[in-house]
Amino acid sequence: MAVLITGIGELTTNDPELGKLRDAALVLDGETVAWAGPAGRAPDADERVDVEGRAVLPGWVDSHTHLVFAGDRTAEFEARMAGQAYAAGGIAVTVDATRAASDEQLVENLRRHVEEAAAQGTTCLETKTGYGLTVADEARSARIAGEVADEVTFLGAHLVPPGADAESYVDLVCGEMLDAVAPHVRWADVFCETGAFDEAQSARVLKAAAERGLGLRVHGNQLGEGPGVRLAVELDAASVDHCTYLSDADVEALASSNTVATVLPACDLSTRQALAPARRLLDAGATVALASNANPGSSYTTSMAFCVTTAVLQMRMTVDEAVWSATAGGARALRREDVGYLRPGARADVHVLDAPSTTHLAYRPGVPLTHAVWRKGARLR
Ligand code: NIG
């Protein structure tokens, strides 16, 4: 059944030829966008929805979350707000709670967060393993993630489990663990940082994953400058995420690569760090994605609108840049072209704001502006 969305005050397509349209219309046919253009030229459809001058944009593409977890880290957050620094070790608290949870609890928690995100306009969501850290627990997390999320990343190399020997653990990740998770995941990732995995260990994990045909992602340069960005670029990772502390060489390497720099402003704020240098990356010519990094430790929010608002108000991105980075940029970080756009052939993932333009995302910070959402052509709200 075809649905004509009309009365669009401002339509963000992200398509270089269609651009941003005023007084526009959009036709969804099943799971796909069939037509986008000026309202006066819109074809007929089975059903008509008048959005009365509101802004319409592609659903958010959240390319970085960690939502297969159980438990709570409020106490760690409180300690951080009292001055304690964020450190990778906190991950172990969530690992204990996740291992102790039943499959049903993990599925329910994941679904609840994905639904929370969708209600705010997120229509494509990546999530990771990484709170299991045994072969069985990582395989379970990967299977559960695959039942709910659009994209799944294996992050067995999130932390060396307390008490384990680092090199033996990397052997396990590169062998038995990868074999067990591979059927459920498209991506592999590594936390390349002091307190997690060093450059040589990270390279081993990424190369083993690439040999099995998985795409690569890297957590890098979150807590300080380091080898994460360089490694990601060298291995043609789809994205390197965090990018909070970058040398000039890192920025140049990203600008001349296919690796997307994914910045995570909610995490930078929740860990009381500097905000990632998105303006510097954009000015150098790098591709920037914005993502929530929703997880119970460093960034407990599913709000992509919050990330866009922060990017504009505090990171000196323009509204158009921030919206692109949170939609098409996220798609680029996932090496997809079917999401993040509203043009014929794209997935029918539509976000209607209760506002006349996307500028209101920054102009009205903190105000919930999601009016309606379609995902794969089905209306969610
Ligand atoms: O992206 N940096 C590593 N992983 C997550 C944090 C996970 C946690 O603290 O539980 C991140 O920030």
Image: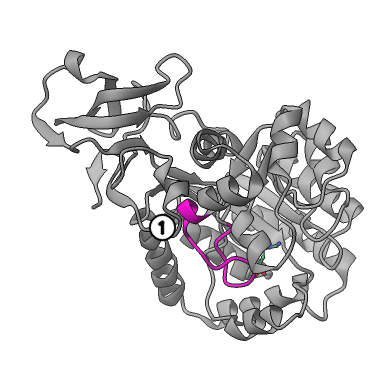
Q: Is residue 338 visible?
A: yes
Task: Residue at 83%, 31% (x, y): give it.
Answer: 252
Please provide percent x and percent y for residue 225.
Answer: 87, 52
* 143 displayed left or right of 6: right
Disc 1 residue lies near ligand 1 with CB under 8 A:
no
User: Magenta segment range?
Assistant: 293-306
Q: Which residue appears farthest toward the left when viewing the image?
A: 46
Which residue is tagged 1?
117
| Amino acid type at mark 1 | Ala
Task: Name the quadrant containing residue 353.
Answer: top left
Q: Is residue 257 visible?
A: no
Left-right relation of 338 to 286: left
- The kind of secondary structure element at disc 1 is helix
Location of residue 377 (image quadrant)? top left
Task: Please state the horizontal and vertical placement of residue 53, each as a whole percent of the image.
Answer: 23, 35
Where ligand 1 lies, by quadrant?
A: bottom right
For the image, the number of numbered tags is 1
Looking at the picture, does residue 8 appear above or below residue 300? above
Left or right side of 15 for 178: right
